[in-house]
């Protein structure tokens, strides 16, 4: 167990085994808790409901969340200036990933990079003003405004909804374009197959109940269309006291690494050249009976006096560097009105 406290968060940063055991114990006893786990599933937090202090942590996951803040933010024009990785540097990293794919070491690799961000809003103000399916704010640490479900567990059924495929919703026939794009189809099918295999490790009767449905995501510049699928499975009768075991069997999330998972994780470590940290990890809430969790994307990290927005997308043998670089930049947004 790591006794260090991360920046302004007054909670123990637990190692993988401590996280797993704590989640099993709390869920087995029907005790509600929030959990936050980093990308490589090596460390994170498990915080009981009555110990969540909104001065340090705020969240909205499903129907659960912290109480509305008493702080009234003044409406002001959002200033948003992004300095992404250079095209030349990105191309070097992209070329390495494609070479690994063409060598047969991966079918799909999720390549991400950090971008410097300057804005006149604090992370807390962005949290308060944004509308997202999943929201998480840790004081002086990071902000998540994610549209992507990782897994939900309700009445013995586990459901995963991976997202793969993004397009500007204002383009002519945008939905038809994204659904008919063969590169996007191959990428999405690969992830669905990976998630189906992952769920089969913890559940029976695993099936794809919805394949490639489109959702609209609002950003401050333009709306995006995002393609998702739904995969379900049936958990064993004792699943509640094994919540931690189940979750860690599925991590890291397939949609943000690639396939095959273990080799692709090695490729990502070599290609990206930076530490993802909690970006693309998972956060979630167990209410005493059911659990809902999210992939931590649309993520802004505070690094001293600077803000860093981490983003990226899936690369396949059919990928073009220009379009992947543009997608990385396109995903640097917050869902504000």
Image (tube, rainbow, N blue to C red):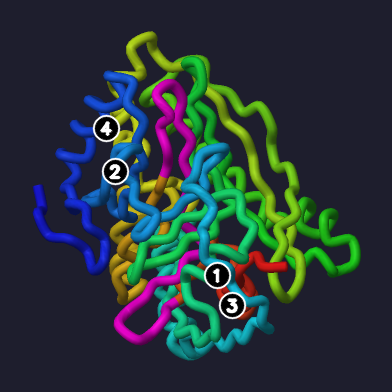
Discs 3/1, front: 1
Residue 295 position in % (x across, y down): 47, 50
- Residue in the foreground of this view, choosing between 150 and 335: 335
Magenta part of the protein: which range?
284-308
What is the distance, in whole Å, between disc 2 and disc 4 at their CAs?
15 Å
Q: Secondary structure at mark 1?
A: helix
Q: Secondary structure at mark 2?
A: helix
Residue 192: x and y, percent? 56, 39
**First in sequence: mark 1 vs mark 2:** 2
Where the C terminus falls, by quadrant? bottom right
Q: Which residue is tagged 3?
A: 329
SS state under label 4: helix
Disc 4/disc 1 C-alpha distance (Å): 30 Å
* Residue at image mark 1: 126
Q: Earlier in the sequence, mark 2 or mark 4?
A: 4
The answer to the question of whether label 1 and label 2 lie on touching residues, with beta carbons closer than 8 A, is: no
Q: What is the x, y in percent for residue 305?
A: 34, 86
- Do tag 3 and tag 2 residues touch (Cβ < 8 Å)? no
Label 1 Cα crowd, 10 Å radius (few <14 / some 14-19 / many 20+): many
* Mark 3–mark 4 distance (CA, rounded to whole Å): 36 Å
Residue 23's mark? Answer: 4
């Amino acid at each position: 167990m790591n006794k260090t406290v991360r920046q302004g968060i007054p909670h123990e940063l637990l190692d993988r085994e401590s996280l797993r055991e704590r989640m099993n114990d709390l869920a087995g006893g029907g005790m509600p808790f929030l959990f936050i786990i980093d990308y490589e599933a090596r460390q994170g937090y498990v915080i009981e409901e009555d110990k969540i202090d909104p001065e340090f942590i705020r969240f909205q996951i499903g129907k659960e969340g912290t109480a509305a803040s008493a702080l009234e933010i003044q409406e002001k024009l959002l200033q948003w200036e992004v300095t992404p990785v250079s095209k030349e540097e990105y191309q070097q990293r992209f070329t390495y990933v494609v070479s690994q794919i063409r060598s047969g070491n991966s079918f799909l690799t999720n390549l991400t990079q950090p971008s410097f961000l300057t804005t006149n809003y604090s992370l807390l103000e962005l949290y308060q003003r944004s509308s997202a399916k999943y929201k998480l704010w840790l004081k002086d640490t990071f902000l998540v405004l994610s549209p992507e479900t990782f897994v939900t567990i309700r009445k013995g059924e586990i459901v995963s909804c991976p997202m793969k495929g993004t397009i500007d919703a204002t383009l002519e026939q945008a939905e038809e374009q994204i659904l008919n794009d063969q590169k996007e189809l191959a990428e999405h099918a690969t992830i669905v197959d990976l998630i189906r295999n992952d769920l089969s490790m913890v559940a029976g009767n695993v099936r794809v109940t919805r394949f490639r449905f489109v959702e609209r995501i609002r950003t401050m510049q333009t709306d995006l269309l995002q393609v998702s699928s739904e995969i379900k499975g049936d958990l064993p009768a004792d699943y509640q006291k094994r919540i931690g075991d189940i979750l860690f069997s599925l991590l890291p999330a397939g949609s943000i690494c690639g396939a095959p998972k273990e080799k692709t994780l090695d490729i990502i470590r070599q290609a990206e050249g930076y530490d993802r940290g909690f970006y693309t990890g998972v956060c979630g809430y167990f209410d005493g009976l059911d659990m809902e969790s999210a992939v931590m994307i649309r993520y802004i990290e505070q690094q001293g006096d600077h803000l860093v927005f981490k983003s990226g997308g899936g690369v396949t043998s059919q990928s073009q560097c220009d379009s992947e670089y543009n997608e990385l930049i396109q995903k640097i947004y917050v869902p504000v009105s």
